[in-house]
Image: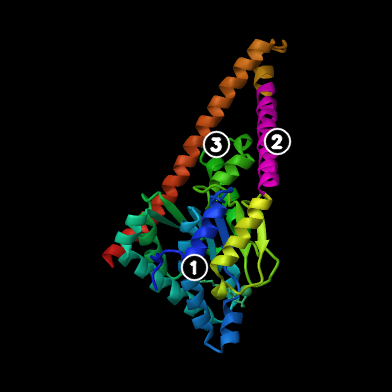
Amino acid sequence: MSWIREGELNFIEKITANILKAGPIPKHVAFIMDGNRRFARKKHVERQEGHMQGFNKLAEALRWCLHLNIREVTVYAFSIENFKRSQDEVDGLMELAKQKFVKLLEEQENLEKHGVCIRVLGDLTLLPLDLQQHIAKAVVATKAHNKCFLNVCFAYTSRYEITNAVREMAWGVEQGLIKSSDVSEAMLSECLYSSNSPNPDLLIRTSGEVRLSDFLLWQTSHSCIVFQSVLWPEYSFWNLCDAVLQYQFNYRSIQKARELHREEQARLQLEADRACIAEVLQHHGNGKPADAQRRQEVLLNYTACREERSQDFLKALKHKRNTFLSDLSSQAAMA
Ligand code: FPP
Ligand code: MG
């Protein structure tokens, strides 16, 4: 089974999709694809078969998302916590991922046709080297595509991601690229694995579990969260429509909360910048209070410098990450 499934919706599905599309459609949907093993038990099949059916459902769900004009999808495919499962299950999931990333590379033409960009979010170094290389090849091969985006969280937890982002900023301070006073919520967001994506509008967890299980905790504070009892391999087009409908019912309050958050962020940043220039003015003003015009000039200048430092640091970080992936990808080509 490939990642991209061709195929139209049936008549009733098409009408439903068109009705939904008359309202606001989430630009970015995240899935916690839960319930593969319960599905396997229910159907009396091997656990690995449950995970395989889980992958097939992902390919199907991506097709539904495209029909609904949902252009970005993020999925929780393997949590760092999942390493604690039996060796046999972990090996099975690694093997499944390897097969699928190899398959993905064979489908490059199709991915190009649909403009699908695949990103993998997580600490690849925790994975077997051959899987790291296949993933890197897939990511590098599709990085210029920009019609739709699939973010696969693999060897991922949110706390690990946030801790890593804090370490990256500490590295930036250590390297003299930024000052510790440049650290902000906005900068931390830019250091997350998800920095290339807008926050999800809708997060769906299947299988009846009502926890976030360390998934996108930072990114979903203003997202619509929908818990559905269906097991992931049994997920249907109608389940997705139901979740989108719940997003539409909550659309206004979500937008309002986001707007309030943006305003609060801008206010906090201005306050932080003012606190920094107060020190500058005291240092250069020989104890004399600066007039309003001088304060405004210093503030503008300080903000521009901080912005420039931050952009240079983020460029260096991106370069470090891209180099890691392209080195892995070319190692794979040589192997
Ligand atoms: C949760 O169900 C599912 C997983 C831990 C694995 C999800 C992986 C896939 C769907 C395959 C995706 C692969 C790629 C390469 C994208 P569970 O195992 O927790 O089942 P349970 O909740 O019934 O125990
Ligand atoms: Mg589970």
Q: Closer to the camera, 134 or 209?
A: 209
Mark 1 element type: helix
The disc at residue 178 is 3
**Residue identified by numbered label 2:** 264
Q: Quadrant of ligand 1?
A: bottom right
In x, y percent, where is residue 226?
A: 66, 61
Q: Residue at x 28, y 63 (%)?
A: 333
**Residue 189 visible, this angle:** yes
Q: Which residues are magenta?
A: 251-278
Crowd tier of the residue under label 3, counting other residues whose Cα lies within 10 Å: few below 14, some 14–19, many 20 or above: many
Disc 1 within 8 angstroms of ligand 1 (CB): yes
Instruction: Please tell me how many numbered marks the rendered image carries.
Output: 3
Seen at 67% across and 46% down, the residue is 254
Tell me which amino acid carries mark 3.
Answer: Ile
For image coordinates 64% across by 51% down, the residue present is: 248
- Secondary structure under tag 3 reads loop
Query: What's the residue at 68%, 34% (across, down)?
Result: 263
Quadrant in which the N terminus appears: bottom left
